[in-house]
Amino acid sequence: MKYRSTRGQVRGIPFSEAVMMGLADDGGLLLPESIPTLSADELKQIADLPYPQLALNILSRYIDDIPHAELKELVERSYSTFEHPDVTPVIAKGDVYILELFHGPTLAFKDVALQLLGNLFEYLLAKSNAHMNIIGATSGDTGSAAIYGVRGKQGINIFILHPKGKVSPIQELQMTTVTDDNVFNIAIEGTFDDAQAIVKEIFGDLDYKQKHALGAVNSINWARVLAQVVYYFYACLQVQKLTGAKEVEFSVPTGNFGDIFAGFIAMQMGLPIKKLILATNGNNILSRFVTKGDYSAAEVHHSLSPSMDIQVASNFERYLFYLYGEDSARITAAMKTFQTDGMLPVSSEELTQTQQIFSAATIDDEETLKTIGAFSKETGYTLDPHTAIGVAAGKQMRTGSCPLICLATAHPAKFGAAVKQATGDNPTLPPAFEGIDRLERKLETMPADIEAVKQYLDRHVLT
């Protein structure tokens, strides 16, 4: 399996090189040159596999330059850190199925990908006797999951930018209380989009990227998306066994389009998904695109679901590549147009094509709180704000002809203030959070200025 860039100037590279490259050297995003498909019989054959074995089965279809036995060891080590034996259990609650993705070290869905990615990085760097400096931006959960994925690992320093005061207190504590020598936290005086733009611009400076051996852990890294594809297979196959349904629907809270794009890939692989329901908060560039064909940037507003406070979705270019008929020249032109005009062109035919796969809904803070409260009363189950957005959108947009699976992206204790506002009670604090506010912290604050960030990197990168 070889990989190519959405912008056409990078192609024919193996998985290992794609992982280490992160953002393609031409500024595009990396994708496999083909998407493997599974027949109905093959789906039946893998339906009863435990999660690590299922992951190995799916991942090995895209990874052919790591020996099978070594890939198996990497996968097993990655998911041994999860507290639940099923890794991503599926639980029936009311008239929906909840796919719990928060049983990893930082209690968020990002762990599913970043525990694996951290081990991949360490493995590949050791093979080549090399080092890496990871830089990424986070709107909440990616930062802590990335840090926990590589903390203390040899040959890796990690630099994570987050918008100052715009992540939840627990999210900030999870990042800043990791004081390993190879971990660096930067609070940017601006929005997540400001932080993400700095990271993208730094990666776009190829000389600087190569000089400092920069790598990416954001969902621009294909390995992140690939790891997330697995839990769509796991959840669908589990629910099919429980219900006998021929198809399922997924409702996915998303801001960067990475999590739902993994569902799109699973669908292209032959997983029987009837519809992918895209759920956003008030920062709704993605739901506006699906409902109206309007992909235009707007001001970011702080919400109760801060991990989705995004107006420029980093992974959307990957979907656009397929929507544009894999036309790299058109992608390149469209992304330049978006950079200058803040809008992306799409035809009515392409909008119709999108709506055959996706439906979408925007859920504001008021409805988020109502959903948390009502779901708690009806089922006794506590949703975090992001998951509540997925549940609310799913209930609005489901076709009703097949089971609905809602992705639970974070433990509710990560957003305790919102949960208490909605239910009147504080969520149960997991052991991982006990005493976290009393730990030593490590943090730098700086303006949303690329030169300031570069100067900081220059002082602290591995060389």
Image: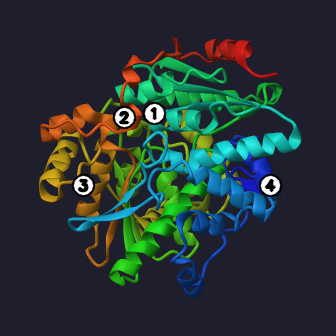
Q: Earlier in the sequence, mark 2 or mark 3?
A: 2
Q: Quadrant of residue 57?
A: bottom right
Question: Do the residues under discs 4 and 1 have CB atoms within 8 angstroms?
Answer: no
Q: Is residue 201 above or below residue 440?
A: below
- Mark 4 lies on residue: 11
Q: Quadrant of the C terminus?
A: top right
Classify mark 2: residues with Cα within 10 Å, few (<14), some (14-19) or many (20+). Answer: many
Horizontal and vertical percent for residue 36? 66, 72
- Mark 3 lies on residue: 392
Residue displayed at 57% across by 49% down: 113
Q: Nearer the viewer, mark 4 or mark 1?
A: 1
Dot 4 lies on which element? loop
Give me the C-alpha separation between circle 1 and circle 2: 6 Å
Using the image, tell me which numbered label, if any, was put on residue 306: 2
Q: Earlier in the sequence, mark 3 or mark 1?
A: 1
Q: Earlier in the sequence, mark 4 or mark 1?
A: 4
Horizontal and vertical percent for residue 139? 45, 33
Give me the C-alpha separation between circle 2 and circle 4: 35 Å
Q: Earlier in the sequence, mark 1 or mark 2?
A: 1
Classify mark 3: residues with Cα within 10 Å, few (<14), some (14-19) or many (20+). Answer: many
Dot 3 lies on which element? helix
Q: Is residue 357 above or below residue 207?
A: below
Q: Amino acid at mark 4?
A: Arg
Horizontal and vertical percent for residue 400? 25, 74
**Considering depth in this image, is 171 or 89 the residue closer to the camera?**
89
- Mark 1 lies on residue: 139
